[in-house]
Amino acid sequence: MRGQKSEEDILLEKESFYAEQGINVLLGKRASSLNAKDKIATTEDGLEIGFEKALLATGGRPKRLPIPGAELDGVHYLRTIENSQAIAKEGVPGRRGVIVGGGFIGMEIAASLTQLGAEVTVIEMAPYIWSRFLDETTAKYFQSYYQDKGISFFTNESVQQLHGQGVVASVETKSGKRIECDFVCVGVGIDLNDELAKEAGLEVGNGVLVNEGMQTSHPDIYAAGDIANYYDPIFGKRRRVEHWGHAEYTGQLAAENMAGAGKTYDLLTYVFSDIFDLRLEFAGDETEYEKILIRGTFEENSFVVLYMKDGKLTAYLSVNTSPREFIPMQRLIRRKIDLSSNLNNLTDKSFDLRKLLQQG
Ligand SMILES: Cc1cc2nc3c(=O)[nH]c(=O)nc-3n(C[C@H](O)[C@H](O)[C@H](O)COP(=O)(O)OP(=O)(O)OC[C@H]3O[C@@H](n4cnc5c(N)ncnc54)[C@H](O)[C@@H]3O)c2cc1C
């Protein structure tokens, strides 16, 4: 979006790779039905493809705003490169953008547009941004950091209607505020592309249900990536994860198992993000925690958020800290070491975390 990389730079593989590997890629074709009984996938234009094993990796699409004015020009969503290019064009000094949704994607867009020179306002319905995985104190640190970079926030606020003559010109909030703008970007989550799975009669519930080997309720159909609701043996529960690393890992795992490998999921999920000059690296399951500890200080813009449950580390979010500590923290999570008597050491940046591993 900021023009630092060309379209070619971000391709997973060059087009020639697929032919070299004997992979037949059909672009511009939508699979419109999946017959699990006869094992046939059909494309929208009527091509029937028989299979022995199939993988569903259909991901999701941005949730649309269900409000009047949402169809106006200048209202953007972000999933594809075309979406990204359209948003980048709005990033011009003097243009005013409203970002609906202060999640990861909303904040990444806000930061990129601010860096491109646009004036950005974020509307978030929770009391503070990233409320799904941060407590109020930590979230407020990030929010004030972003405010210092020029981003304005309306929290505890949602969007009621978009106004404009053909092109969006203002946003009306639930509490009656009117924010003048030249464009709007919406980042309020995704709807899963799970229609094929449902039609095929697979078990679906917050994603396509798969086991530890990515196999769906049909033994010859697998699912991976955003769409897969999988059993995570590290945390002993079902999860659905919308992260790049997990998508890549589960795609590979499913492929190996489709070829008969019989492997099980063993990834400590992670995600990273660069927002202004904050390098964020997340690992683990941040959705269940009782307590948050901070290793380091907000003042230095370098610290780790530690997520604790039952005295154990379940996840961490590193902000500009040394990757040297990532492996020990990942091991503390995986080994479920009881750290109840070491909370002071955890928050002491000078304490070597590797010492805690010797206990487990
Ligand atoms: C703006 C943005 C920023 C992100 N940033 C990060 C980040 O910093 N770090 C991170 O870890 N993750 C990030 N993510 C999440 C990450 O991109 C996703 O988790 C990942 O792409 C999921 O991969 P997937 O293969 O499951 O789905 P997708 O990448 O969505 O791929 C699904 C593909 O299936 C195709 N498809 C769907 N239905 C059909 C059909 N019926 N027939 C044929 N084809 C079909 C779609 O066109 C698409 O190409 C970001 C996502 C977005 C949108």
Image: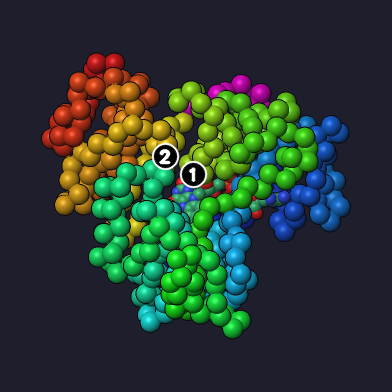
Overall secondary structure of the magenta section: loop
Residue 321 visible to an observer of this rendering: yes
Residue 354, percent across and down?
22, 26
Is 351 positioned to the left or the right of 114 in the image?
Answer: left
Colour scheme of the picture: rainbow
Residue 270, numbered circle: 2
Element type where label 1 sits in the image: loop
Is the N terminus in the top left, top right, bottom left or bottom right quadrant? bottom left
Q: Residue at x 55, y 24 (%)?
A: 264
Q: Tell me which corner region of the image, top left, top right, bottom left or bottom right, holds residue 36.
A: top right
Q: Tell me which corner region of the image, top left, top right, bottom left or bottom right, holds residue 339.
A: top left
Element type where label 2 sits in the image: strand
Decide: is 27 above or below 48. below
Question: How far apart in space, not on screen, are marks 1 and 2 (Cα)?
Answer: 7 Å
- Residue 262 lies within the magenta run: yes
Is 323 positioned to the left or the right of 223 in the image?
Answer: left
Residue bearing mark 1: 243
Residue 216, percent across and down?
68, 30
Residue 88 visible to an observer of this rendering: no
- Residue 23 lies within the magenta run: no
> Disc 1 beta carbon < 8 A from ligand 1?
yes
Q: Tell me which corner region of the image, top left, top right, bottom left or bottom right, holds residue 271.
A: top left
Decide: is 116 above or below 196. below
Question: Is disc 1 in contact with disc 2, using a CB cutoff of under 8 Å?
Answer: yes
Mark 2: give few (<14), some (14-19) or many (20+) Cα within 10 Å. some
Magenta extent: 255-266
Amino acid at the residue labelled 2: Tyr
